[in-house]
Image (cartoon, rainbow, N blue to C red):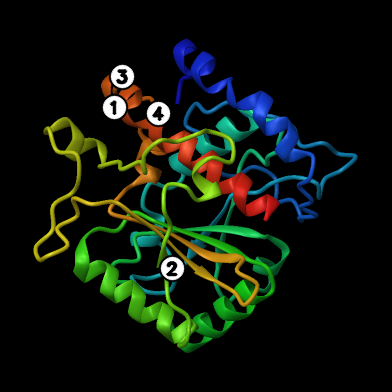
Amino acid sequence: MKMKKSSRYALAIAGVAVLAAAAVVSLAQFGPAPPSVDRRGVPNWEVDNEMPRDVFTFVRIRYGSYGRRGGKWATDYPDADLNFSYRLQEMTSLKVHPEGKVLDLTDPELFDYPFAYLAEPGDMWLSEEEVKSLRKWLLNGGFLMVDDFWGGDEYDNFAHEMKRVFPKREAVDLPIEHPVFHTVFDLQEKPQLPSIGIAMNGWEYEPRPGPDNGSEVHYRAIHDDEERIMVFICHNTDLGDGWEREGENQEYFRNYSEPKAYPMGINIIFYAMTH
Protein backbone atom coordinates (compact mmCIF):
# COMPACT_ATOMS: atom_id res chain seq x y z
CA MET A 1 0.00 0.00 0.00
CA LYS A 2 1.31 3.43 -0.93
CA MET A 3 -0.25 6.31 0.94
CA LYS A 4 -1.92 9.00 -1.16
CA LYS A 5 -1.54 12.62 -0.07
CA SER A 6 -5.28 13.20 -0.41
CA SER A 7 -5.99 10.32 1.94
CA ARG A 8 -3.63 11.76 4.53
CA TYR A 9 -5.43 15.10 4.55
CA ALA A 10 -8.94 13.63 4.50
CA LEU A 11 -8.32 11.17 7.31
CA ALA A 12 -6.21 13.52 9.41
CA ILE A 13 -9.38 15.18 10.72
CA ALA A 14 -9.87 12.06 12.81
CA GLY A 15 -6.79 12.84 14.87
CA VAL A 16 -8.24 15.68 16.93
CA ALA A 17 -11.41 13.79 17.83
CA VAL A 18 -9.49 10.62 18.59
CA LEU A 19 -7.18 12.31 21.09
CA ALA A 20 -10.03 12.64 23.57
CA ALA A 21 -11.33 9.15 22.95
CA ALA A 22 -7.92 7.53 23.26
CA ALA A 23 -7.35 9.11 26.66
CA VAL A 24 -9.84 6.71 28.25
CA VAL A 25 -8.59 3.60 26.47
CA SER A 26 -6.85 1.02 28.64
CA LEU A 27 -5.66 -1.99 26.67
CA ALA A 28 -2.99 -3.88 28.65
CA GLN A 29 -2.29 -6.33 25.82
CA PHE A 30 0.63 -8.61 25.18
CA GLY A 31 2.57 -7.62 22.09
CA PRO A 32 2.79 -10.12 19.21
CA ALA A 33 5.98 -11.82 18.15
CA PRO A 34 8.53 -9.87 16.08
CA PRO A 35 7.36 -9.03 12.55
CA SER A 36 7.16 -12.09 10.29
CA VAL A 37 4.55 -11.10 7.70
CA ASP A 38 5.51 -9.70 4.29
CA ARG A 39 4.37 -6.09 4.70
CA ARG A 40 3.83 -5.62 0.94
CA GLY A 41 5.07 -2.05 1.05
CA VAL A 42 3.10 -0.95 4.12
CA PRO A 43 5.38 1.23 6.31
CA ASN A 44 6.64 -0.30 9.55
CA TRP A 45 7.12 1.38 12.93
CA GLU A 46 8.53 0.56 16.35
CA VAL A 47 6.49 -0.45 19.38
CA ASP A 48 7.32 1.52 22.52
CA ASN A 49 9.73 -0.69 24.44
CA GLU A 50 8.88 1.05 27.71
CA MET A 51 5.19 0.13 27.44
CA PRO A 52 5.11 -2.98 25.20
CA ARG A 53 1.68 -4.05 26.47
CA ASP A 54 0.04 -0.65 26.07
CA VAL A 55 -0.67 -1.16 22.39
CA PHE A 56 -3.72 -1.99 20.29
CA THR A 57 -3.33 -5.17 18.28
CA PHE A 58 -5.60 -6.03 15.36
CA VAL A 59 -6.47 -9.69 15.99
CA ARG A 60 -7.94 -11.80 13.21
CA ILE A 61 -9.84 -14.97 14.10
CA ARG A 62 -8.84 -18.20 12.38
CA TYR A 63 -11.76 -20.59 12.62
CA GLY A 64 -11.55 -24.29 11.92
CA SER A 65 -13.90 -24.70 8.96
CA TYR A 66 -12.13 -24.82 5.55
CA GLY A 67 -8.88 -25.75 7.29
CA ARG A 68 -6.55 -23.69 9.45
CA ARG A 69 -3.92 -22.97 6.81
CA GLY A 70 -6.27 -21.04 4.57
CA GLY A 71 -9.87 -20.48 3.66
CA LYS A 72 -12.49 -17.87 4.16
CA TRP A 73 -11.17 -16.77 7.55
CA ALA A 74 -8.12 -15.43 5.66
CA THR A 75 -10.07 -13.30 3.16
CA ASP A 76 -8.22 -10.00 2.55
CA TYR A 77 -5.36 -11.13 4.82
CA PRO A 78 -2.75 -9.81 5.44
CA ASP A 79 -3.20 -6.58 3.46
CA ALA A 80 -6.43 -5.49 5.16
CA ASP A 81 -4.94 -6.02 8.63
CA LEU A 82 -1.67 -4.26 7.78
CA ASN A 83 -3.29 -1.29 6.04
CA PHE A 84 -5.89 -0.76 8.74
CA SER A 85 -3.30 -1.00 11.51
CA TYR A 86 -1.18 1.58 9.68
CA ARG A 87 -4.12 3.96 9.37
CA LEU A 88 -4.88 3.66 13.08
CA GLN A 89 -1.26 4.32 13.99
CA GLU A 90 -0.75 7.28 11.65
CA MET A 91 -4.11 9.04 11.81
CA THR A 92 -5.03 8.63 15.49
CA SER A 93 -3.29 8.89 18.83
CA LEU A 94 -3.84 5.18 19.47
CA LYS A 95 -0.64 3.15 19.76
CA VAL A 96 -0.93 0.21 17.37
CA HIS A 97 1.15 -2.87 16.75
CA PRO A 98 2.35 -2.87 13.12
CA GLU A 99 1.76 -6.54 12.40
CA GLY A 100 -1.36 -7.68 14.20
CA LYS A 101 -2.11 -11.24 15.17
CA VAL A 102 -3.95 -14.33 13.90
CA LEU A 103 -5.43 -16.53 16.62
CA ASP A 104 -7.64 -19.58 16.81
CA LEU A 105 -10.80 -19.24 18.89
CA THR A 106 -9.47 -21.98 21.14
CA ASP A 107 -6.10 -20.30 21.73
CA PRO A 108 -5.76 -19.19 25.39
CA GLU A 109 -3.83 -16.15 24.12
CA LEU A 110 -7.09 -14.76 22.75
CA PHE A 111 -7.95 -13.70 26.30
CA ASP A 112 -5.04 -11.24 26.23
CA TYR A 113 -6.83 -9.16 23.59
CA PRO A 114 -10.12 -7.23 23.86
CA PHE A 115 -10.87 -6.95 20.11
CA ALA A 116 -10.98 -9.47 17.28
CA TYR A 117 -12.06 -9.45 13.63
CA LEU A 118 -13.78 -12.36 11.87
CA ALA A 119 -14.28 -12.45 8.08
CA GLU A 120 -16.69 -14.31 5.80
CA PRO A 121 -18.77 -16.35 8.26
CA GLY A 122 -21.48 -17.05 5.66
CA ASP A 123 -20.98 -20.80 5.73
CA MET A 124 -18.73 -21.01 8.78
CA TRP A 125 -19.28 -23.80 11.24
CA LEU A 126 -17.74 -23.92 14.71
CA SER A 127 -16.58 -26.90 16.71
CA GLU A 128 -17.91 -27.33 20.23
CA GLU A 129 -14.53 -26.21 21.57
CA GLU A 130 -14.67 -23.03 19.46
CA VAL A 131 -18.23 -22.31 20.62
CA LYS A 132 -17.29 -22.63 24.28
CA SER A 133 -14.13 -20.55 23.97
CA LEU A 134 -15.88 -17.79 22.01
CA ARG A 135 -18.69 -17.60 24.57
CA LYS A 136 -16.21 -17.37 27.44
CA TRP A 137 -14.10 -14.69 25.72
CA LEU A 138 -17.12 -12.54 24.87
CA LEU A 139 -18.58 -12.77 28.37
CA ASN A 140 -15.18 -11.80 29.76
CA GLY A 141 -15.16 -8.52 27.86
CA GLY A 142 -14.26 -9.48 24.30
CA PHE A 143 -15.57 -7.51 21.31
CA LEU A 144 -15.94 -9.42 18.04
CA MET A 145 -16.32 -7.57 14.73
CA VAL A 146 -17.87 -9.73 11.99
CA ASP A 147 -17.54 -8.59 8.37
CA ASP A 148 -17.95 -9.53 4.71
CA PHE A 149 -20.94 -11.81 4.23
CA TRP A 150 -23.94 -11.26 2.02
CA GLY A 151 -27.58 -12.23 1.61
CA GLY A 152 -30.12 -14.09 3.69
CA ASP A 153 -28.65 -17.57 3.39
CA GLU A 154 -25.23 -16.52 4.65
CA TYR A 155 -26.75 -14.50 7.47
CA ASP A 156 -28.98 -17.41 8.54
CA ASN A 157 -25.97 -19.70 8.75
CA PHE A 158 -24.03 -17.19 10.84
CA ALA A 159 -27.06 -16.62 13.11
CA HIS A 160 -27.34 -20.37 13.60
CA GLU A 161 -23.74 -20.60 14.76
CA MET A 162 -24.20 -17.63 17.12
CA LYS A 163 -27.27 -19.33 18.59
CA ARG A 164 -24.95 -22.13 19.59
CA VAL A 165 -22.80 -19.54 21.37
CA PHE A 166 -25.71 -17.62 22.95
CA PRO A 167 -28.99 -19.58 22.62
CA LYS A 168 -31.09 -16.88 24.32
CA ARG A 169 -29.52 -13.73 22.87
CA GLU A 170 -30.77 -12.03 19.72
CA ALA A 171 -28.93 -9.73 17.34
CA VAL A 172 -30.61 -6.32 17.05
CA ASP A 173 -30.37 -3.75 14.28
CA LEU A 174 -28.52 -0.57 15.22
CA PRO A 175 -30.06 2.70 14.02
CA ILE A 176 -27.92 5.40 12.44
CA GLU A 177 -28.35 7.38 15.67
CA HIS A 178 -26.32 4.78 17.60
CA PRO A 179 -23.03 6.22 18.96
CA VAL A 180 -20.92 3.72 17.01
CA PHE A 181 -21.67 5.68 13.84
CA HIS A 182 -20.51 8.93 15.44
CA THR A 183 -17.67 8.03 17.84
CA VAL A 184 -14.93 9.67 15.73
CA PHE A 185 -16.42 10.23 12.28
CA ASP A 186 -19.96 11.59 12.21
CA LEU A 187 -21.46 9.26 9.60
CA GLN A 188 -24.79 10.25 8.09
CA GLU A 189 -25.56 6.86 6.57
CA LYS A 190 -24.61 3.27 7.23
CA PRO A 191 -21.68 2.58 4.88
CA GLN A 192 -21.98 -0.23 2.36
CA LEU A 193 -18.94 -1.45 0.44
CA PRO A 194 -18.85 -3.99 -2.37
CA SER A 195 -15.58 -5.73 -3.13
CA ILE A 196 -13.40 -3.98 -5.68
CA GLY A 197 -14.29 -6.33 -8.54
CA ILE A 198 -18.01 -5.87 -7.97
CA ALA A 199 -17.65 -2.10 -7.64
CA MET A 200 -15.64 -1.76 -10.83
CA ASN A 201 -18.45 -3.56 -12.66
CA GLY A 202 -20.92 -0.92 -11.55
CA TRP A 203 -22.59 -2.68 -8.60
CA GLU A 204 -23.07 -1.12 -5.18
CA TYR A 205 -23.53 -4.49 -3.50
CA GLU A 206 -22.82 -8.19 -4.05
CA PRO A 207 -26.09 -9.75 -5.26
CA ARG A 208 -27.40 -12.95 -3.71
CA PRO A 209 -30.57 -15.01 -4.37
CA GLY A 210 -33.59 -14.73 -2.11
CA PRO A 211 -35.54 -11.99 -0.33
CA ASP A 212 -32.37 -10.58 1.24
CA ASN A 213 -30.41 -10.12 -1.98
CA GLY A 214 -27.55 -8.16 -0.41
CA SER A 215 -28.77 -4.72 -1.45
CA GLU A 216 -29.54 -3.41 2.06
CA VAL A 217 -26.66 -3.04 4.50
CA HIS A 218 -27.22 -4.15 8.09
CA TYR A 219 -25.26 -3.31 11.22
CA ARG A 220 -26.40 -5.48 14.11
CA ALA A 221 -25.20 -6.26 17.61
CA ILE A 222 -25.44 -8.94 20.25
CA HIS A 223 -25.34 -7.45 23.76
CA ASP A 224 -24.51 -8.82 27.19
CA ASP A 225 -26.72 -8.35 30.25
CA GLU A 226 -25.30 -4.86 30.79
CA GLU A 227 -26.11 -3.82 27.19
CA ARG A 228 -22.44 -3.88 26.21
CA ILE A 229 -21.92 -4.90 22.59
CA MET A 230 -20.16 -8.26 22.42
CA VAL A 231 -20.62 -9.01 18.71
CA PHE A 232 -20.76 -6.24 16.10
CA ILE A 233 -22.14 -7.58 12.82
CA CYS A 234 -21.43 -5.90 9.47
CA HIS A 235 -23.71 -7.68 6.99
CA ASN A 236 -24.10 -6.97 3.28
CA THR A 237 -20.88 -4.99 3.26
CA ASP A 238 -17.15 -5.65 2.96
CA LEU A 239 -15.14 -3.19 5.02
CA GLY A 240 -12.11 -5.45 4.80
CA ASP A 241 -11.86 -5.10 1.04
CA GLY A 242 -11.92 -1.32 1.44
CA TRP A 243 -8.85 -1.66 3.67
CA GLU A 244 -7.08 -4.29 1.58
CA ARG A 245 -7.56 -2.72 -1.86
CA GLU A 246 -7.17 0.97 -1.06
CA GLY A 247 -3.95 1.32 -3.07
CA GLU A 248 -5.07 -0.58 -6.17
CA ASN A 249 -7.60 1.74 -7.78
CA GLN A 250 -8.03 5.47 -7.28
CA GLU A 251 -11.77 5.38 -7.96
CA TYR A 252 -12.34 2.59 -5.44
CA PHE A 253 -10.22 4.39 -2.89
CA ARG A 254 -12.03 7.70 -3.38
CA ASN A 255 -15.56 6.22 -3.37
CA TYR A 256 -15.25 3.43 -0.82
CA SER A 257 -12.00 3.13 1.16
CA GLU A 258 -11.60 6.77 2.16
CA PRO A 259 -15.21 7.84 2.93
CA LYS A 260 -16.59 4.50 4.14
CA ALA A 261 -14.23 1.65 5.05
CA TYR A 262 -11.74 3.57 7.18
CA PRO A 263 -14.20 5.90 8.98
CA MET A 264 -16.46 2.99 9.91
CA GLY A 265 -13.55 0.81 10.97
CA ILE A 266 -12.04 3.54 13.13
CA ASN A 267 -15.43 4.23 14.70
CA ILE A 268 -15.87 0.56 15.57
CA ILE A 269 -12.43 0.31 17.17
CA PHE A 270 -12.90 3.38 19.33
CA TYR A 271 -16.41 2.44 20.33
CA ALA A 272 -15.19 -1.03 21.34
CA MET A 273 -12.26 0.35 23.32
CA THR A 274 -14.26 3.03 25.16
CA HIS A 275 -17.44 1.11 26.03
Please say if 56 is above or below 249. below
Label 2 – label 4 distance at C-alpha: 33 Å
Tell me the mark number nearer the camera, choosing from 4 and 3. Answer: 4
Seen as rendered, the residue at the extreme left is 209
Residue 79: image quadrant is top left
Q: CA distance from mark 3 to mark 1?
A: 6 Å
Q: Amino acid at mark 3?
A: Gln
Q: Mark 3–mark 1 contact, CB under 8 Å?
A: yes
Q: Which residue is mark 4?
A: 259
Q: Residues within 10 Å of mark 1 (few under 14, many from 20)?
A: many
**Which disc number belongs to residue 250?**
3
Q: Residues within 10 Å of mark 4 (few under 14, many from 20)?
A: some
> Which residue was labeled with disc 2?
68
Q: Amino acid at mark 2?
A: Arg
Of mark 4 and mark 3, the one earlier in the sequence is 3
In the depicted view, which residue is nearer to us: 60 or 231?
A: 231
User: For the N terminus, which image quadrant?
Assistant: top left
Q: Nearer the viewer, mark 2 or mark 4?
A: 4
**Type of amino acid at the residue the image marks with label 1:** Tyr
For disc 1, the marked residue is 252
